[in-house]
């Protein structure tokens, strides 16, 4: 089983101005966002990342580079189109306060599975390709690095929410109940039994507990099962 750390990019100039950036080029981190990305890098220093993957959009690549720069030995940043931002089509570049007046806005809030952005992507298609990409990458990391491997993916708010919803067994129509802030960290551990959501929308705190325990491979399979009563946590001695 592998574990993915889902990182939303830091705050951007578009976030600060209330604009839906979508896939528009040239949208980068603002000063606050750069500082947020640096703090995420500090949080991940104690985690032995097997891979670092980013959406190809600039704001995510900047955040991923800050994570890589914080690591003494560095790490290569790979890009993955499957976790890029939703294609908001004609909505991108417009002010959120204006979009909130559109009829489609209400559908996005209450029944996102039926929402299709004009000249863009449906939210169902967004979730399907994002979940497929994360699960494929997770399986590849485990195959190469073994059970317990940890990797990080830097992506976007709606993308991360849709992946979390899938892991929680939530219908896409409920994914607006989740919140994913800029530079927040969420964590999912995939196993042969089920995904486990270990954290959502965290902003601070040590993450070194995500380092894989030194256990015999024969014991790793037992970690696929939920512990009755909740267990003793990641610091417990096997």
Image: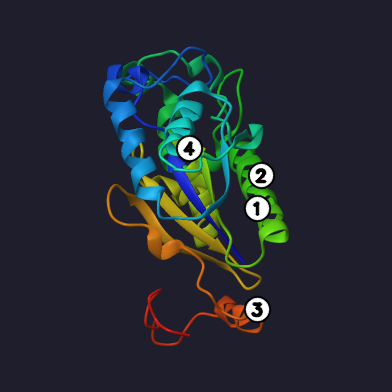
SS assignment at label 4: helix
Q: Which residue is mark 3?
A: 217
Mark 3 surroundings within 10 Å by alpha-carbon count, few (fewer than 14), some (14 through 19), many (20 or more): few
- Residue located at (33% from left, 39% from top): 181
- Residue located at (37% from left, 57% from top): 207
- Report the Cα–Cα distance between label 4 and label 1: 22 Å
The correct choice, above or below, for 74 with respect to 221 in the image is: above
- Report the Cα–Cα distance between label 2 and label 4: 21 Å
Q: Which residue is mark 2?
A: 133
Residue 177 is at least partly visible in this image: no
Q: Which residue is mark 4?
A: 68
Residue 231 is at least partly visible in this image: yes
Q: Quadrant of residue 194?
A: bottom right
Q: Earlier in the sequence, mark 2 or mark 3?
A: 2
Q: Which residue is mark 1?
A: 135
Mark 1 surroundings within 10 Å by alpha-carbon count, few (fewer than 14), some (14 through 19), many (20 or more): some
- Residue located at (48% from left, 34% from top): 64
Depth check, front residue: 173 or 139: 139
Contact (CB < 8 A) between labels 1 and 3? Answer: no
Mark 4 surroundings within 10 Å by alpha-carbon count, few (fewer than 14), some (14 through 19), many (20 or more): many
- Report the Cα–Cα distance between label 3 and label 4: 29 Å
- Report the Cα–Cα distance between label 2 and label 1: 6 Å
Q: Earlier in the sequence, mark 1 or mark 3?
A: 1
The correct choice, above or below, for 43 with respect to 28 in the image is: below
Q: Name the mark nearer the viewer: 2 or 3.
A: 3
């Amino acid at each position: 089983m592998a574990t993915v750390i889902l990182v939303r990019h830091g705050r951007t100039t578009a976030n600060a101005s209330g604009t839906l950036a979508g896939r528009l080029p040239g949208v980068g981190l603002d000063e606050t966002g750069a500082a947020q990305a640096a703090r995420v890098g500090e949080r991940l220093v104690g985690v032995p990342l097997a891979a670092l993957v980013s959406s190809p959009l600039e704001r995510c690549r900047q955040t991923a580079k800050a994570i890589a720069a914080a690591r003494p030995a560095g790490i290569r940043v790979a890009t993955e189109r499957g976790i890029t931002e939703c294609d908001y089509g004609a909505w991108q570049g417009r002010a959120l306060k204006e979009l909130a007046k559109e009829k489609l806005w209400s559908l996005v809030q209450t029944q996102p599975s039926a929402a299709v952005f004009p000249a863009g992507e449906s939210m169902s298609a967004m979730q399907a390709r994002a979940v497929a990409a994360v699960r494929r990458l997770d399986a590849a990391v485990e195959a190469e690095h073994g059970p317990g491997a940890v990797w990080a993916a830097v992506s976007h708010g709606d993308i991360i929410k849709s992946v979390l919803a899938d892991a929680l067994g939530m219908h896409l129509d409920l994914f607006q109940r989740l919140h994913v802030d800029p530079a927040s960290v969420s964590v999912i551990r995939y196993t042969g039994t089920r995904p486990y959501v270990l954290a959502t929308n965290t902003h601070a705190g040590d993450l070194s507990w995500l380092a894989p325990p030194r256990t015999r491979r024969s014991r790793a399979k037992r970690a696929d099962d939920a512990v009755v009563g909740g267990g003793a946590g990641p610091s417990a001695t096997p």
